[in-house]
Amino acid sequence: MIKNLPLLDLAIIAIYLVAMVLVGVYFSRRNNSSDQFTKASGLIPGWAIGLSIYATFLSSNTFLGVPGKAFGGNWNAFVFSISMPLAAWVASKYFVPFYRSTGEVSAYTNLEKRFGAWARTYAVVCFLLTQLARMGSIFFGISLTLQALTGYSMETIMLVTGICIIIYTVMGGIEAVIWTEVVQGVLKTLGAVLIVYLIVVDMPGGVSKIIAIGQQDDKFSLGSLSLDFTQATFWVVLLYGFFINLNNFGMDQNYVQRYHTASSEKEAAKSVWLCVWIYVPASLMFFIIGTCLYAYYQVNPELIEAVKLQAAAERLGLNANSIEIKNLAASLQPADYGDKVMPHFMVTMIPTGLIGLIVSAILSAAMSTISSGMNASATVFSEDIYKRYFKANISEKQNMKLLHIATVVFGLLGMICGIAMIGVKSILDIWWQLSGIFAGGMLGLFLLGIISKKSGNMEAFAATIVGILVIIWLSLSNLIPVDYAYLKNPLHANMTIVVGTLTIYLTGAFITRLKSKNI
């Protein structure tokens, strides 16, 4: 399956990487203050911010994980995208005006004013863990594709792409991040359109054959409509999507920081809606790619054998012999190798020149999310950790140096997390699980602070402790021995953020009500 890319494709990828670094060099001339580094001095137009948020959403997890998910299953995960408009309505109506009125570049400063220093620190830790999980899963996804195309090791690929991202993010700040994401957002959307075209053109029977195979194998299903929260039903994914998108738009520094780069509150709200209206149809296109690939390999089953053998070899490890690998490969289901299918199609079926363009699109999908994660993590570290606990009054020069060092450190930590993920079955699954665990407690505390006006420090702290215990039980109950199976969490993993958020909010509101009754 591994082959070396033709020189033309390598040249296209190299030009793309150099262009991204030059964007950082260009903006470095203006990037001489922390306000410019973190907010771009509030001069970015709403349409550019909207495309930037869209590019952050549409990561390589979407580019590779979604087609892999659709190939191995159905369109159930698309329900996540369907939930976005409702979360965007809440964000534009309540969150954007709230953050613009505070003027604080960090999303978490207000939590300290509301509940004390512990609340701010807790949210910051949750955010940084989420970012590392996100960056790690994206580094892993991009290296998976490029390894199939170039034969270089996954670690080498992470290092090269990581260094390029670090250079332009450090030099150009949030302005470079946003404008590179505008280009990256357009590039990866065109890349997806091109892949759909190439599959359909090469498919005997064309679109009608793809639809016929998809209907026959139930590939277009959005999931069961039964009220069963132990499976990934329509309602489980809808709830997960609503809560995670509410967390993204309302608590995630990546997005909150963008609201401050806009020239006005109206422009900031417009950017949220622009992101949603582009992302929903774009994400649908990636489900279409997965179903197209499924139909293509159903018609050409001999072409998928190499993928199954590679998946089997990775699962068995270096000590396995060829007979063991063949036997396991024969028993694998589409869900077991879904993430590897699109890289394989690119390697074997896409002509020279176009591979370079599509790899650049996948690189842009990864780089846009990682660069914004690095900038946001550095901003949070500077505002919420260093200035809060170590030295509040630092000079502008010291703050810029701190932001630069933190950006590099978080980029390197993201790479390490990516290396640690090598070997997971589904990028999308592992990312959804980790984000649900780390984000679950954060959103509940934030909603308690905004909605329950009478809740104070003690009520919030007690509710958070209860919430953390519930999230730990939800996440780790698979370790409970079989003898105590009745103590295991019966819910689907995607319900962690839903139950965690509601536990913290409802516990805090309940304690507040009890306290007010006793007074």
Image (cartoon, rainbow, N blue to C red):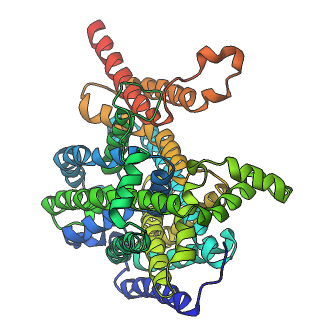
Provide residue 324's location: percent of width, then percent of height.
81, 52
Residue 341 in view (yes/no): yes
Residue drawn at 34 percent across, 83 percent down: 30
Counting the numbered discs, the total is 0
Q: Would you identify the image quadrant in which residue 111 lies? A: top left
Q: Residue furthest top?
A: 518
Provide residue 145's location: percent of width, then percent of height.
57, 69
Q: Residue furthest front?
A: 205
Residue 412 in view (yes/no): no
Residue drawn at 31 percent across, 67 percent down: 52
Foreground: 49 or 169? 49
Image check: 268 left or right of 339? Answer: left
The correct choice, above or below, for 475 with respect to 508 in the image is: below
Image check: 346 left or right of 318? Answer: left
Q: Would you identify the image quadrant in which residue 292 lies? A: bottom left
The correct choice, above or below, for 76 with respect to 483 in the image is: below
Image check: 102 left or right of 202? Answer: left
Provide residue 366's location: percent of width, then percent of height.
48, 67
The quarter of the rendered structure image containing the C terminus is top left
Q: Would you identify the image quadrant in which residue 397 lies? A: bottom left
Foreground: 415 or 42? 415
The correct choice, above or below, for 343 with respect to 244 in the image is: below
Image check: 458 left or right of 266? Answer: right
The quarter of the rendered structure image containing the N terminus is bottom right
Provide residue 491's location: percent of width, then percent of height.
49, 26
